[in-house]
Amino acid sequence: MAILEVRHLQKTFDHTQVLRDISFSMEKGSTLSLIGSSGSGKTTLLRCLNFLETPDEGQILVSGEVLFDASVPATRKEQEIRKKRLHFGLVFQSFNLFPQYTALENVMLARELLAREQPDYKQRKKQIREQIEAEGVQLLEQMGLRDRMGNYPHQLSGGQCQRVAIARALALKPDILCFDEPTSALDPELTGEVLKVIRELAERDTTMIIVTHEMAFARDVADTVIFMDDGRICEQGDPKEVFANPKEERTRQFLASHRT
Ligand SMILES: Nc1ncnc2c1ncn2[C@@H]1O[C@H](COP(=O)(O)OP(=O)(O)O)[C@@H](O)[C@H]1O
Ligand SMILES: [Mg+2]
């Protein structure tokens, strides 16, 4: 069964259709590269998946469960929305770390807030927090930040901050981790560091959707590429095939202007 199934999503802003009949699905453990020119709707699609925007039409299913259906009145209960949101992790271009917290505290924070909702939190507080800390340490080690856990964001490079942000997203154990231009704010050296950890996540079969302008990376890391143009899926398929042999004129033009 597909881990993610998106059916006929539509989204309009101010009478402009920004997503037009978007349908695709993903298998567990696969990586999807989402590419396309600026304004083609990539961020809006990720924001719809993460319940930051509400589509006008369509459905979103995770592991067969309908998380969103435009034809059914949406829940307004904050707790239910948060639960749905937990299926997805989101890493933005700007890392948005809390400056007053260390790297490790930034990674642990969301988990701790979530744990407080557990009925047994009060009795097992110490044990739960130790567990969350152990997992946070492990994730930061995986991100190559063993020596940086106690550092504050201002003491870290942009690449290190972004790796903390990735660890923070993974700490919530999302089914699907989404990246929106994770390296666009970084210089080439730091970009390389961040792409390396994303590549390692792909090798560990983390399910990921990656919006990026790093074309060689988009081709090499992904199992599938979706090329978006003007709110539509213009072309999708095996990245090596699509890059070598684009069928649509718009894909061809885009790839020609973004040489790998
Ligand atoms: N909150 C919003 N209100 C109005 N228009 C928006 C909003 N967010 C995005 N748009 C418009 O939707 C289109 C797609 O934007 P976006 O999803 O950010 O594209 P991409 O990420 O591919 O660059 C753009 O024309 C943008 O101006
Ligand atoms: Mg965008």
Image (cartoon, rainbow, N blue to C red):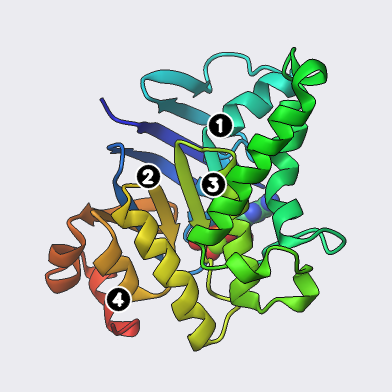
Question: Based on the displayed image, in which of its 4 quarters is residue 48 positioned?
Answer: top right
Question: Based on the displayed image, in which of its 4 quarters is residue 132 positioned?
Answer: top right
Q: Amino acid at mark 3?
A: Leu
Q: Earlier in the sequence, mark 2 or mark 4?
A: 2
Q: Quadrant of the N terminus?
A: top left
In front: mark 2 or mark 4?
2
* Res. 170 mark: 3
Q: Earlier in the sequence, mark 3 or mark 4?
A: 3
User: Residue at label 1?
Assistant: 56
Image vertical order of residue 76 relative to residue 21, above or below:
above
In front: mark 2 or mark 3?
3
Q: Position of residue 78 (x, y in %)?
A: 75, 23
In front: mark 3 or mark 4?
3
Secondary structure of the residue carrying tag 1 is loop
The residue depicted at 25 percent of the width and 68 percent of the height is 220
User: Residue at label 2?
Assistant: 207
Q: Residues within 10 Å of mark 2 (few under 14, many from 20)?
A: many
Ligand 2 quarter of the rendering = bottom right
Q: Position of residue 214 (x, y in %)?
A: 39, 75
In front: mark 4 or mark 1?
4
Q: Amino acid at mark 4?
A: Ala
Q: Earlier in the sequence, mark 1 or mark 3?
A: 1
User: Residue at label 4?
Assistant: 216
In front: mark 1 or mark 3?
3
The residue depicted at 52 percent of the width and 17 percent of the height is 71
User: How far is disc 1 from disc 3 in space, using C-alphas?
Assistant: 29 Å
Q: Earlier in the sequence, mark 4 or mark 1?
A: 1
